[in-house]
């Protein structure tokens, strides 16, 4: 989406120069930072469409920045992480980051991830409340209640839960879920799907015992959501 605004935060000047040159060459307006401290203020002022955020920074870390931004904004956040940051990466995703890339990464892959993030945030018409079993999702305000308990979901957790509830009783293949929630470039990234299913189940379970078990895994195929009273027919995703 040419003309979209991006903020890139990385403490390596060479990486910043390379990313800025490539992103601007594809029509994006880019602001860069070499430290994490000013990130939240820049996001408020510049109002970017996507934030590219290094997980490890000299003055803070991507987890703290993600948490701070998520307190008031749903802007897509793509983490840039080094090999070995697996635990921190999962924590950042749980705090609201939408995606991650492991360094070193291919520029074409980064551009594809940015396009997916922009597509997922485009539009936004008002929709009704989606109810399935103990879960109620207000699709306009993105508020979620499980057994009446307010439950915070990150943007991707919300999209995943919404897809499963809308297809209640059907087994959706991993590739179908990945394409619908993350985009067609992600259809082979089973790891990110497993991570988010684990996170979503844990949050549902914390709000109401056994709610997490309503998301069932069909080994080698995919996932389904079946409410206690549901009788949906299985099908292909």
Image (tube, rainbow, N blue to C red):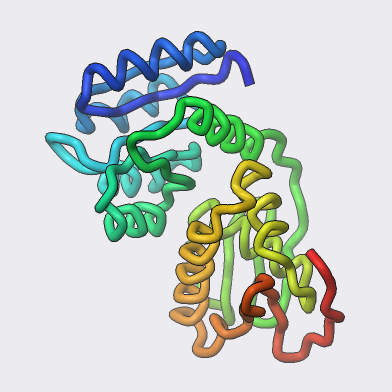
Q: Quadrant of residue 235?
A: bottom right
**Front residue of 76 and 134:** 76
Is residue 129 left or right of 67 when viewed as pictured?
Answer: right
* Quadrant location of the N terminus in the rendered image: top right
Which residue is depicted at the point 42% across and 20% down?
46
Q: Position of residue 135 (x, y in %)?
A: 64, 75
- On screen, residue 103 above or below 46: below
- On screen, residue 48 above or below 29: below
* Quadrant location of the C terminus in the rendered image: bottom right
Q: Position of residue 104 (x, y in %)?
A: 34, 34
Q: Quadrant of residue 80?
A: top left
Is residue 204 left or right of 122 when viewed as pictured?
Answer: left
Q: Position of residue 219 (x, y in %)?
A: 62, 78
Which residue is depicted at the point 79% across and 74% down?
170
Is residue 95 left or right of 141 when viewed as pictured?
Answer: left
Q: Quadrant of residue 215?
A: bottom right
- On screen, residue 49 above or below 233: above
Q: Position of residue 69 (x, y in %)?
A: 37, 41
Which residue is depicted at the point 58% across and 81% down?
147
């Amino acid at each position: 989406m040419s003309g979209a605004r991006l903020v890139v935060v990385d403490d390596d000047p060479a990486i910043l120069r390379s990313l800025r040159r490539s992103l601007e060459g594809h029509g994006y307006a880019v602001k860069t930072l070499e430290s994490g401290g000013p990130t939240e203020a820049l996001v408020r002022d510049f109002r970017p469409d996507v934030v590219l955020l290094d997980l490890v920074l000299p003055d803070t870390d991507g987890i703290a920045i993600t948490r701070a931004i998520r307190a008031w904004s749903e802007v897509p956040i793509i983490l840039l992480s080094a090999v070995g940051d697996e635990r921190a990466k999962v924590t950042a995703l749980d705090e609201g980051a939408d995606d991650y890339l492991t360094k070193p990464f291919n520029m074409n892959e980064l551009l594809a991830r940015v396009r997916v993030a922009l597509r997922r945030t485009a539009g936004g018409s008002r929709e009704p409340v989606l109810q399935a079993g103990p879960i109620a999702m207000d699709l306009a305000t993105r508020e979620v209640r499980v057994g009446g308990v307010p439950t915070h979901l990150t943007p991707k957790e919300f999209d995943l839960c919404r897809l499963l509830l809308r297809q209640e009783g059907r087994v959706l293949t991993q590739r179908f879920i990945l394409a619908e929630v993350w985009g067609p470039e992600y259809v082979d990234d089973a790891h990110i799907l497993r991570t988010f299913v684990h996170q979503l189940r844990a949050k549902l379970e914390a709000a109401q015992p056994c709610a997490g078990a309503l998301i069932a895994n069909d080994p080698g195929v995919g996932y389904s959501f079946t409410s206690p009273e549901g009788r949906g027919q299985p099908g292909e995703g």
